[in-house]
Image (cartoon, grey):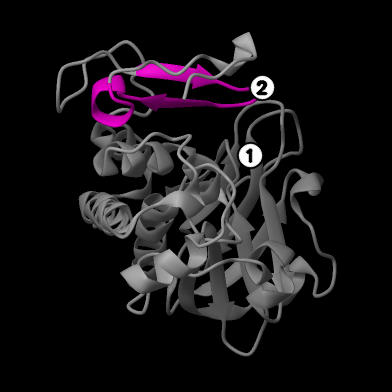
Amino acid sequence: MPELPEVEALKDFLTEHLVGHEIVRVLPVAISVLKTYDPPLTALQGREVTAVRRYGKFLALATDGGPQLVTHLARAGWLQWKDRLPDVPPRPGKGPLALRVALETGAGFDLTEAGTQKRLAVYVVHDPEEVPGVARLGPDPLAGDFDEARLAALLAGERRQLKGALRDQGLIAGIGNAYSDEILHAAKMSPFKLAGALTAQETTRLYEALRTTLTDAVERSRGLAAGRLKAEKKSGLRVHGRTGEPCPVCGDTVREVSFSDSSLQYCPTCQTGGKPLADRRLSRLLK
């Protein structure tokens, strides 16, 4: 799933390639991707793109005097840029293509989604706050006013485990499954530690890990073409998706805990005092 660093990089890429250009066609290929009907997609056509903004994991394309195109790539969605789009319009079918946006230059992009669970979402709205997922977002962790005190206030009284709290978009915007694993590994904390039970020193450690992990990921992705961002994300991860590999910090074996629709990875030596966490599939947990 694209998370804050990849969506931030997509925002920069699209700012460079879209702003100042006119949208001439917006072609829905998978009708289910469109979550709004007023304004219609055609209201974007003939409009110049004036800005591209990120809201958590959402991307918003603003147009001159018109509505905005907001998209969430979900778990398996992606944006594919093409310097020259095919001349023949795409046909609805069972393929990954969900939506095509064409510019006056002949360039444009496709929104695609792999797999059978179709969760990619597109909205045409006057204000991104009209999108429920945007309206409920918590603060952006890379914002200038997101300091340690704000993180401490957000976590105060939280009864959830750190892993779940970090992934809650209503608490902090933009962090998903992969970067929550990476942040907790950098902070040397168990994913199951209670968020509201952190000491002042632990809060400092978590804040520094959060900012450093996300900032470094953004910097690695900056300037890359859209098609290279997935590979860059994977290459930069230390523990997420690396079950069975040696931890790059201590050399211990990276372990996994699986859930019904996802999994987390962690290093026992770095994060849990050397004690493996029992897989949730076994219906028990070692703390």
Q: Residue at horizontal 61%, vertical 22%?
A: 259
- 1 or 2: tag closer to the N-terminus: 1
Distance (Cα) linking label 1 and label 2: 27 Å
Vertically, is 246 above or below 262? above
Disc marking residue 125: none
Residue type, numbered disc 1 = Leu
Q: Residue at horizontal 21%, vertical 56%?
A: 219
| Front in this rendered view, residue 3 or 63 | 3
| Front in this rendered view, residue 84 or 130 | 130
Query: Which residue corresponds to mark 2?
Result: 260
Which residue is situated farthest in the bottom direction here? 65
Which residue is situated farthest in the right direction here? 37
Which stretch appears magenta?
255-273
Secondary structure category for the residue under label 2: loop
Vertically, is 262 above or below 18? above
Secondary structure category for the residue under label 1: strand
**Between tags 1 and 2, which lies in front?**
2
Instruction: Residue 241: say if magenta.
Output: no
Percent from the top left, x then y, of residue 268? 31, 21
Residue type, numbered disc 2 = Ser
Vertically, is 95 above or below 124? above
Percent from the top left, x then y, of residue 145? 36, 79
Disc marking residue 97: 1
